[in-house]
Amino acid sequence: MRIVPRPSDKHLPATPRRTAAVSASERSRAVRLAAALLGLALAALGNAAVAAEKEAGKEKPAIASWYAETVSHSDSGMNVTHLWALDSRFRAETVIGGLELVTIVSGDTYYTYDATTMAGLAIRRSPAAIAEDRRVPRPFGNELDVLIQDGGEKVREETVAGRPADLYRVTDDNGARNVWVTQDDRRLPIRVEVFNRKSGLKRYKEYIDWAAGLPLADAFFAPDPRVQFQRFELDEYVAKVLAKDPATAIPILYGELLNGPTPH
């Protein structure tokens, strides 16, 4: 006789337990709790979205360094200028009639010198010019800002050098100024046209290159130590200009950086 082992109780399938009935009030409470938790989750998502939107809407950090190349032309001739800025410091190199004129503006001093003769002027800037350093985004390329301050408005949209641009214009007793700017948030000038009503002449400036965020060294905005500078207080320099002193023969190309904003 064969003996068949009896299954142990632990191998037998468990008998399902009867689930206690859930009352209607308990189901209602559970539904309300789930709805509340869902509402909290949606509120958290909404708050996160609002925070992200506010973060996106914040003003972008100011760009510290800039470069531009310009070509200016009028009935009197044409010149090419390279411009750099690091915060409020400024450097420009312009060739006029075979002479290389370098302008450096740093702190309270305006330097201008002829790099071919290594002679130049160092003039103390006016308080108004220094105060303007904190207001404008960079020492150059602010023609649109000046034009709008003088009452200029957008006229239309045009294409300049193959790119879309906004044209702004202001007219007054002196004539008219037109500034074409890029249509992005930087509103960089592309072309500037100035018409003098009295003389009937026009002057043009073309910005043919822009670059931002360049790694510029502080020393780039210091004048060449080999240059022989004549140093003046601003009122002393103005007096010598009025007296047509030969010491002031080196031109001041960026008067607004020396004297402050000039009414147009």
Image (cartoon, rainbow, N blue to C red):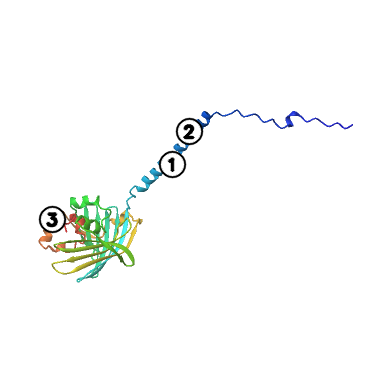
Q: Nearer the viewer, residue 76 or 98?
A: 76
- Label 2 sits on a secondary structure element that is helix
Mark 3 in CB contact with mark 2 (< 8 angstroms): no
Q: Is residue 52 left or right of residue 34?
A: left
- What numbered label is drawn on residue 236? 3
| Amino acid tagged 1 | Leu
Q: Nearer the viewer, mark 3 or mark 2?
A: 2
**What residue did someone put label 1 on?**
45
Residue at 24% x, 56% y is 145
Q: Residues within 10 Å of mark 2 (few under 14, many from 20)?
A: few
Percent of width and height locating residue 131: 21, 50
Q: Is residue 72 above or below residue 63?
A: below
- What numbered label is drawn on residue 167? none
Visible in this render: residue 224?
no
Q: Nearer the viewer, residue 1 or 165?
A: 1
Q: CA distance from mark 3 to mark 2?
A: 83 Å
Percent of width and height locating residue 27: 53, 31
In primary-sequence order, the first of circles 2 and 1 is 2
- Residue 23 placement: quadrant: top right
**What residue did someone put label 2 on?**
32
| Amino acid tagged 2 | Arg
Q: CA distance from mark 1 to mark 3?
A: 65 Å
Residue at 21% x, 54% y is 109
Q: Nearer the viewer, mark 2 or mark 1?
A: 2
Residue found at the very far front of the displayed protein: 24
- Label 1 sits on a secondary structure element that is helix
| Amino acid tagged 3 | Glu
Percent of width and height locating residue 264: 16, 59
In primary-sequence order, the first of circles 1 and 3 is 1
Percent of width and height locating residue 106: 25, 54
In primary-sequence order, the first of circles 3 and 2 is 2
Residue found at the very far right of the displayed protein: 1
